[in-house]
Amino acid sequence: MLQTKSITKDIKNDQATFNQIKQLYKSAFPKQEQAPIPWLLSMTKKDTVKFDAYYDDDVFVGITYTLSFDGVTYLWYFATSSELRGKGYGSQILHHLNECFPNDRIVLNLEVQDASKSDSEMRKKRKEFYIRNGYTLADYSCIFNRNHLDVMFTHGAVTKSEFLSIFKHNFNPIMHFLTKPKIVD
């Protein structure tokens, strides 16, 4: 059974844990998809933002970072430690999110499927993983922080306007302007 630890700006006082989280974050997400860690930590003051670390006993397993608004939870960041991938931890974490947000539809982004990309096989596996865990591909995609991303959801469809509202509600105007979330039909 996984245990969770809420991550806030106070995590910097626990340097070992902070370093694990920072290392996973920086290795799991391309630089152009990374928001500044101090900003992510400052956002956790909001009730609609959760940053969690996951552990199996004392073993660090992964992280999630979610934004919620009006019955929709956006899974912005989700990563498991590379040495633990393929052991079922990712599915356990998604199950945990379902328990944390039992009345919400959960939406996420992933790289668009593109056979010409060097990581096309990883993109395909990632999409298949989400489908196995109950996610459905939306009929729209998005541009977020200049990246073209597919949209997937579970527990019911998320409309385009609901998707964009998550960012309008949770981001300050400057961050909203910098990330420029928009829908692609």
Image: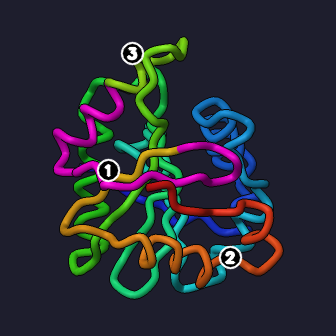
Residue 66 or residue 146, whichever sits in front: 146
Task: Please rate how many residues cluster around mark 2, counting C-alpha atoms within 10 Å: few if below 14, some from 14 to 19, many from 20.
Answer: some
State the extent of the magenta-drawn residues as a range. 125-148
Q: Residues within 10 Å of mark 1 (few under 14, many from 20)?
A: many
Tell me the residue at 72%/71% (across/down). 176
Residue drawn 53% across and 17% down? 117
Residue 69 horizontal side relative to residue 159, left or right: right
Report the mark closest to the observer, 1 or 3: 3
- Distance of mark 2 from mark 1, alpha carbons? 25 Å
Please tell me which residue lies in front, 183 or 102.
183
The amino acid on which the numbered mark 1 sits, given as a three-letter code, is: Ile
**Amino acid type of the residue that numbered disc 2 sits on in the rendered structure:** Phe
Q: Position of residue 43 (x, y in %)?
A: 68, 74
- Residue behind mark 2: 171
In the shown orientation, is residue 101 left or right of residue 47? Answer: left
Residue 158 vs residue 103, the one in the foreground: 158
- Tell me residue 9's x, y (percent): 73, 68
> Magenta segment: does it hold 47?
no
* Total count of labels: 3
**Residue at x 83%, y 74% (from the top left corner):** 174
Q: Is residue 112 above or below residue 125?
A: below
Query: Which of the two discs, 2 and 3, labels the residue nearer the N terminus?
Result: 3
Residue under circle 3?
A: 121
Q: What residue does disc 1 label?
A: 93
Q: How is the image coloured?
A: rainbow
Dots 2, 1 in contact, CB < 8 A: no
> Where residue 75 sits: x, y (%)?
44, 59
Image check: 131 left or right of 37? Answer: left
